[in-house]
Image: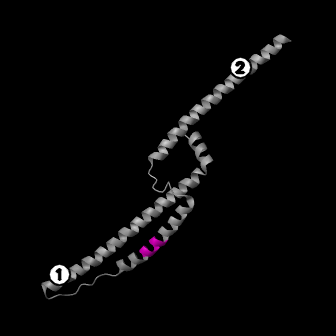
Amino acid sequence: MAQTTRRRRKKKKKGRGKLIFLLVLLIGVSTWNYQRNAAIEEAKPRPYKAYADAELEQLRAAYESQAAALSGRYAQASSQRAGSREVKLVAEGVEQFQQVQRASRAVRDLGSQLSQEEASLRAIEEEQALRARLGGPVMTVLTRAFTY
């Protein structure tokens, strides 16, 4: 009877040893994978990472309204073409050329501003999509630890 009890204890100790070894291995691999995934995520530029979710939503709404306003102004400005007329004097021709250049520059500037607003809006939307995909802090840790 005592010998049977000893055998059972040895089997339990062996089983516990294997279990502890597997747990240590799992923790080690998960830690390594977490650090690797965290480094990969840190390498990607995320200009809006420090903002809270509510602040991101406010920024997105502001950029959307700004982009809509600029889009309307850009469409209106680009549809208005500067007309050319026949000129008799060189000075009038130079003045007309300068007016056309100013109008073209204004349209290009509006287009540039619109592009910058849209790029910022896309970056905010990408940050929000990333946060939705990662979930909360617990899901972020689990995703980093168990995703290869």
Residue 85: assigned label: none
Q: Position of residue 77 (x, y in %)?
A: 36, 79
Q: Nearer the viewer, residue 89 or 29?
A: 29
The answer to whether residue 96 is magenta is no
Quadrant of the rendered image containing residue 108: bottom left
Badge 2 amino acid:
Lys
Residue 97, quarter of the rendered image: bottom left
The reply to whether discs 1 and 2 touch (Cβ–Cβ < 8 Å) is no
Q: Quadrant of the N terminus?
A: top right
Disc 1 to disc 2, how far (Cα)?
95 Å
Q: Earlier in the sequence, mark 1 or mark 2?
A: 2
Q: Which residues are magenta?
A: 65-71
In the rendered structure, the answer to whether residue 95 lies left or right of residue 148 reads left
Quadrant into which the C terminus falls: top right
Q: How is the image coloured?
A: one colour
Residue sitting at x 47%, y 43%? 40
Percent across and percent down for residue 138 are 62, 46
Q: Secondary structure at mark 2?
A: helix
Kind of residue at disc 1: Val
Magenta: predominant secondary structure element? helix
1 vs 2, front mark: 2
Above or below, comparing residue 64 to residue 36 in the picture: below
**What residue did someone put label 1 on?**
94
Most extreme residue toward the right is: 1
Q: Position of residue 37 (x, y in %)?
A: 51, 42
Per the image, the residue denoted by label 2 is 14
